[in-house]
Image (spheres, rainbow, N blue to C red):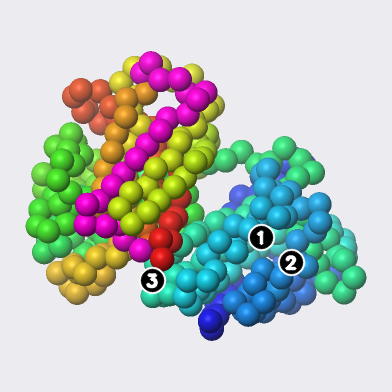
Amino acid sequence: MKQNLILLIGLLLLVLAACDRFDHEFTAPQAVDVDAEFFAPLATAFTAVSNSGVDAIRAFYAEEFMHNGVDKSERLAWIDSFLGGGEISFVISDTQSSTFDNNNGVVNWRLQIIGPDAKAVLADSLFSGEKIRREGEGWVLEGNKVCTGPQSKQLVIAEYFTFDTCPNCPPSEAKLHQLQTQYPNFIYLEHHIANSLLVPGNDTSGYYSAYSAPSAVFQGAAKVIGSSAAALADYESIVGSLVTVDEPISYELSNITHNAQQISATVHISPNISIDMTDVHLSYLIITDEVTQTNINGDPLHNVVRAVGRTALAGQNLEQGIPISLQMTNGLPSNYKLVVFAQYRPQTYVNNATIYGGIVHSVSAR
């Protein structure tokens, strides 16, 4: 299996919140060229992962590696889980670094794992505040285990309403796709309100009274209609503000199982703020790029909603977790994402159906 790795040096400024609580400016180090000495060798190692498995990158993780509770073996097992089903590419981007001396530093970087069709993103992870140290002639990652970890920011969700022959929708889709690329904690869910991609029983557009396309509702509160320059500027302003908000609820998925027709999991939520669970629901959706339809310009569609479920959280035992399940009688896509989020959903929507962050789980069902 041939591997292709693209190493991109991103210019996106990420706020480092490493838990040693010191501020670091991510500028090009003077004494150490981290790109040449660490990221370039790491990129080269990822190109060899298909031939030798994760052994090719094992040396880049310190034995005591720990990042937000994930140790070395778990990190390598996660990467290994994507192998063996076709041609996979690893994309390293948004690399930033700061060195304290010639032997110690901190890095931010983004890892994307791309599926065989070069379109489906199987995983997209941003690793912030990772300590690195020189070991022998190279560098190793220690993770952020030596401190309490940065405050997580909420997942920002846009619920977007369209249909494949919509004449005015391509500009909105292009802007949403650009924002998702720009912000790792932003995702949009493409609900089709007509034609063959409409999901039976999906009442989301009706709840928001989003009957015209394009329409987008950001985090359940800000609705923007149309694709004018002013509307697209609103997209950018709203998302830019919401991605900086701390995570109101922490999410974890366990007991994940899937087959050709169904995916099931248990959702554990831990509120970080006081939330009255009356009228709060847990929503869970399957989104995919694997559709044959295109938009009116012939461009591929992204994040298309193919299945929807919802469970009321009032009276639920959150400590035990909430079981969820979604199925498609015609079969699940071979690559898709499970998106889960809690939302205040009063009976009447008045720009107040707040979404409390969420979690995205990528599935390759090859």
How would you rate the neighbour count of disc 3 (Cα within 10 Å): few for under 14, some for 14-19, many for 20 or more?
few
For the residue marked with disc 1, what is the amino acid?
Leu
- At which x and y percent is residue 263? 37, 47
Q: Return the disc, 1 or 2, that comes first in the chain's sequence.
A: 2
Q: Dot 2: what SS?
A: helix
Q: Dot 3: what SS?
A: loop
Who's the residue at 71% across and 70% down the image?
55
Measure the alpha-carbon separation of dots 1 and 2. 7 Å
Provide the residue designation for mark 3: 119
- At which x and y percent is residue 109? 62, 61
Q: Which residues are magenta?
A: 314-334
Residue 356 on the magenta span: no
Q: Is residue 239 visible?
A: no
Label pair 3/1, CB-CB below 8 angstroms? no
| Front disc: 3 or 1 | 1
Mark carried by residue 76 = 1
For the residue marked with disc 2, what is the amino acid?
Arg
Mark carried by residue 58 = 2
